[in-house]
Amino acid sequence: MKSHVIVFPGSNCDRDVAVAIERISGSAPEMIWHKNTSIAESDLIVVPGGFSYGDYLRCGAIASTSPIINEVVKKAKAGVPVIGICNGFQILIETSLLDGALIRNNSLSFICKDIYIKPENTSSIFTKNNVVAKMPIAHNEGNYFATSDTIKKINDNDQVAFRYCDANGLINEGSNPNGSIDNIAGILNDNKNVLGLMPHPERAVELGLGSDDGKYIFEGVLK
Amino acid sequence: MTWEHKTDQSLVESHGLKHDEFDSIVQGLGREPNFTELGIFSAMWNEHCSYKSSKFWLKKLPTTGDRVVQGPGENAGVIDIDDGDVAVFKMESHNHPSYIEPYQGAATGVGGILRDIFTMGARPVANLNALRFGEPNHPKTKHLLSGVVEGIGGYGNCIGIPTVGGEVNFHPSYNGNILVNAMTVGIAKKDKIFYSAAAGIGNPVVYVGSKTGRDGIHGATMASAEFDDDSEDKKPTVQVGDPFTEKLLLEACLELMKEQAIIAIQDMGAAGLTSSSIEMASKGNVGLEIDLTKVPMRASNMTAYELMLSESQERMLMVLEPGKEEMARNIFKKWDLEFEVIGKVTDTKNLVLNMHGKEEACIPINILVEDAPEYQRDYTVREPAGEYQIDPNTLNSKTIIDDLVIMLSHPNLCSRRWIWEQYDHMVMADTLVRPGSDAAVVRVHGTNKAIAISTDCSPTYCKHNSFEGGKHAVVETWRNLVASGALPIAITDCMNFGNPEKPEIMGEFVECIRGMTEACTILNYPVVSGNVSLYNETNGEGIYPTPAIGGVGLIKDISKTKTIAFKQNNSLVYAVGETKGHLGNSQYLSIVQHKELGSTPVIDLNKELKNGKFILELVNQDLALSAHDIGEGGLLVAAAEMSLSSGIGITIDCAIKSHEFFFGEDQGRYLIEIDIQNDDTLKKLSADHGVVVEYIGQTKDAVIEIKENSKISIEELKNNHEKWFPDFTK
Amino acid sequence: MLAKIHITLKKDVLDPQGKVIANSLSDLGFDGIQSVRQGKYIEIILNGDDKNAATTKLNQMCEKLLANLVIEDYSVEID
């Protein structure tokens, strides 16, 4: 089991992801500095959360020009599982591995709280545990937006990974924390090996921290 | 006294220096200072850097203890938390900048305190704050509140240090002077702490971080004759925080600290290069020679004066082991940061500044530091407010639950969720107790232990009896830590007061210090770091005395952590400590009856200690399911908070059911929840400890009910409790 | 009338975003960049055709809401 976590200047959930992966899989991931240009054979690449380059210009925009990104894209296209969490999701969108955009929360403020998400399909390794999961969000720009054509495409092609819901799995306006279209919390690429999501599964891997539901997302890849 | 110097008198005054202070500069130097030197003296001798009005009194605070590794005088205090680990912490004010520009003022306040912590070799693990705003209907309050909260979040969220707790209150005395006090706690190894004393003649002095611009240069430059011609270009600018660069600086510094390379390190905070260089030289009893042309500059044509007084953020000064420069430079290059050798350590004990080959300043360090003015200002102590007899008819105008709803909906007691949901309080994945409980609890990474942290102060208590108020601020944090299951260890203080040249204000300061000293001594809870902010005054109106306290405690086994949330139905709820019904100066009087009257409650510190030890014994024996200190608002507010945070109700059936009993603010009290099968054990243990416990009620359903009186569903109470901030800031 | 408003940080106020954009552009191989300053651009469509009155109003908008005069400058242009 070999995993890799990409570290950009301003990443701040890199350690949290590493701890979570080690906790679940028993082996620590290799941390890859963004100036590197290659990644060894990998079972999982994580682009972690944080504020790469301070979120300056556009969240994820500058990180998506980093040297390591070409390699991440190459591996993703070759079928290696890739997860982008929060800022990592924003970066993957800027690289065009994933569709749509993440715009400012409709509340216009940063939100940090526990939310629930529900897998939309079981066609990917990340979503095959079909359970409602509780985990935190912590972002300013997590409001998923795409043109109606794109929304139709990702719906038709089973590319919606998770939607925000309530504790009972009900998907409604009240359980949408940031204004995302159709409560979209995470999406997949065409091949379903690249996942981007705003919630932080790595912060929900032990009950002492409030939830261990985050394991459902990692387990499919790590076990 | 007539002016006998060549230097323009108004120039000296615009630098905030008094005539006799200037006289002693001339005497010390044996000549009149040049413009750059005048700026340096002005920065070093102002209240903020010299503590000239407060030093005499601050020395009275207890600062030592078994677990104190470093007391006041360094960038932050350091306490031993076992296993070779230490906690490094400090609280600091950024009041005035936050009033001028709330977002950047608050953000740079957070940035500054973070640097104080990682300068010492600690990785910051928690941010907290203590905020005071004017009355909500004051025209500036909404703008200031939103800006400050966004600024604190903007900085902390970006750098990735969780903001885990704090406190906020509104009072008209802060209409023209808000308070923004930021606290950071970091964790380090006891044998890897870094200090600021420069050493080793000839060793390189290194500048790292961001470039220097004309940020926040002392207002005096504006008034000075030299800058009259091109005013707009040289206007001192507000400091802008760059949390991204700070994150890089944090990682680069911690990376370099793993090597044997740093002899001394000091962050450039207030008065930037001036205070950092002088501090390092003074601590090390050496001199420094700096070539200002080497300082990385952002703006063009900066003068020596500007370079020395700039408050550009995210900068550090270090003394390195000779020969380690290239290795260190590579680390800072990797993180895209400036790195420049700008000078060397000398044996002259002078601060010598050169620019373009010309000497711009030469000042003996001891004149700047040891000879800095120190005042024992006159003070008068006001007679504490006396007892106020409440008209019993006004008490029973509404049911007790009606009054509870009014209180819990009020800005000073309502839910702070709107604030802390804007702060990332979970990043680093060690936050065990999130905001909203008595204290925040953060696990020491990779261990089974945790630190508990709480900030507190009650300015109305301090205003009406500064001695008891000073005691209270210290004790309230102590109680919060105890209720969380932590052993309280030490505090940091942030002393916010009005103009010390007014004897009445100085009296408030002196009395608060006296109260704090007594509390810290009896509770064995010393002060290890702190900050003083005076002259918080607008149009002659001073703020209420506000000695904000940040307390830190240790939880040796995280399974013993307590929160305020009720854990189960059918538990018994007891009040620990005696309830007499003290309504003077209470939240009940202020919120329900709109009166600020009566005496500040008196704290019996020996009882306080006894009750606290009893709570820790219950925690130790796993008898307390939940615990909450009874603070502002009194017993019923505390009980309601335990219900609100759990969704589990309580049926109250105690002996007395009066407003005084439910809303009185007697001190030294806690509410605890115990399993019904432990009732006898509790009674026996309390008798053994000589502690008063009083049965209050039983946890039940989702309703708060006072038997034979009134009740409310938790859902309805919650709706009222959560409403104020979102509505106010819409 | 179309009003174009540019809001920029005052000269000498630190612009963290501009600094990062400049570095990133150089990393991408665009050389010769001395510095980058970034700001906001706002378009407002106004009724009526009195340019003088509109300018006064737009200046007020900038001073009251659109710009933070403590750290930002603004300029107004009407097409």
Image (tube, grey):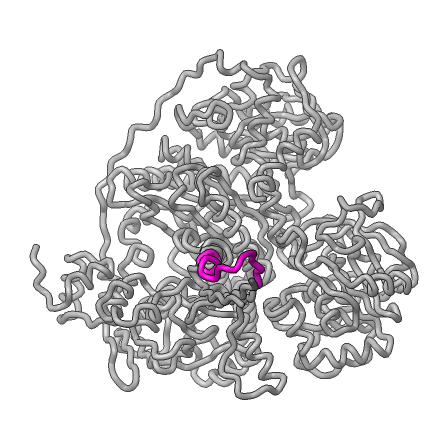
Q: Is residue B197 visible?
A: no
* Quadrant containing the C terminus of chain A in the rendered view: bottom right
Task: From the top left corner, tell me how far across and down residue B368 is, in percent.
Answer: 25, 65
Farthest residue, direction right: A123
* Front residue of this view, candidates A60 and B389: A60
Farthest residue, direction front: C49
Whether residue C53 appears in magenta in the rendering, the answer is yes
Task: From the top left corner, tell me how far across and down residue B323 is, in percent.
Answer: 46, 85
- Horizontal side of residue A146 vs B74, given as left or right: right
* Quadrant containing the N terminus of chain A in the rendered view: bottom right
* Front residue of this view, candidates B685 and C74: C74
Quadrant hosting residue B692 = top right
Whether residue B331 appears in magenta in the rendering, the answer is no
The stretch of residues the image draws in magenta is: C43-57
Quadrant hosting residue A161 = bottom right
Task: From the top left corner, tell me how far across and down residue B86 is, in percent.
Answer: 53, 58
- Horizontal side of residue B376 vs B437, given as left or right: left
Question: Does A43 appear above or below B223?
Answer: below
The residue drawn where x is 67% and y is 37% is: B645
Question: Does B234 appear above or below B148?
Answer: below
The residue drawn where x is 47% and y is 79% is: B339
The residue drawn where x is 84% and y is 77% is: A77
- Horizontal side of residue B554 vs B538, given as left or right: right
